[in-house]
Image (spheres, rainbow, N blue to C red):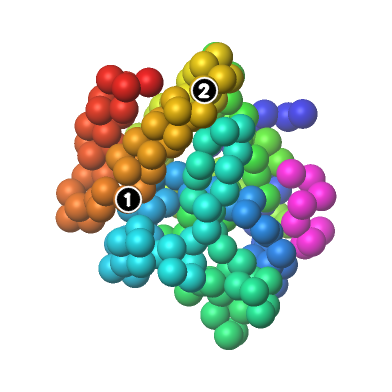
Amino acid sequence: MVLYQSNDMAKVGCNNCKGCSSCCRGMGQSILLDPYDIYQLQTVTGENFVGLMQDKVDIHVENGIILPALKMQPDTDACGFLSKEDRCSIHTYRPGLCRLFPLGRNYDESGLQYFLLEDACHIKTRTKLKIKKWLDVPALARYEKFLVTWHDLRKQIMNRIADQQSDTYTQMINVKLLELFYQKPYDTGLDFYQQFEERIAAISAVI
């Protein structure tokens, strides 16, 4: 597996997908949402987490942790943000996993790298682009640092759940995780990363 840094080139360019919406359909609960995604969705929709849960976001359980995910609509099996023209209605604010595709993330002791999901995208004539241009995330270094911190927190919680083997602990930590990072509204007029660090400090006291 070839690993890339954000300044590397990879075959991800799809000429704006030319209207293809294959990766916006039939994804089940695989598009997990991190806190930055919720911040972005609150910014573009004006909805809080409870509002998003009405029809755009679902709940997914992975390795004992409860996390939100984009919800596929029951009548179309498509993302609720896909327009009638088969275009993403929140493209500038789309979640990180949508922004990343057809790349995946790899985490190790050196930090975050990317790898190409060779057969995931239906378009076979993709062109090479610099990964950071493809991601198109403001302050990419801060975003990548956030991703590593969030990954490490989830891994730490999964390990604690496995060690504790306690339904009471699992419920407690999941309630706290959802409250702090998802249900508690973000101030979209303030820096996300500062708000995230404050919440990291708060949950570190109870893990």
Q: How many marks?
A: 2
Q: Nearer the viewer, residue 98 or 126?
A: 98
Residue that appears at 52% across and 22% down: 166
Q: Secondary structure at mark 1?
A: helix
Q: x, y (%) of residue 5?
A: 56, 31
Q: Is residue 38 left or right of residue 102?
A: left
Q: Which residue is mark 2?
A: 166
Q: Which residue is mark 1?
A: 183
Residue that appears at 58% across and 25% down: 107
Please report contact status of discs 2 and 1: CB closer than 8 Å, yes or no. no
Q: Does residue 138 appear anywhere in the picture?
A: no
> How would you classify the magenta stretch by its main secondary structure?
loop
Reply yes or no: does residue 118 show up in magenta: yes
Task: Classify mark 2: residues with Cα within 10 Å, few (<14), some (14-19) or many (20+).
Answer: few
Disc assigned to residue 22: none
Q: x, y (%) of residue 27?
A: 68, 59
Q: Which residues are magenta?
A: 117-124
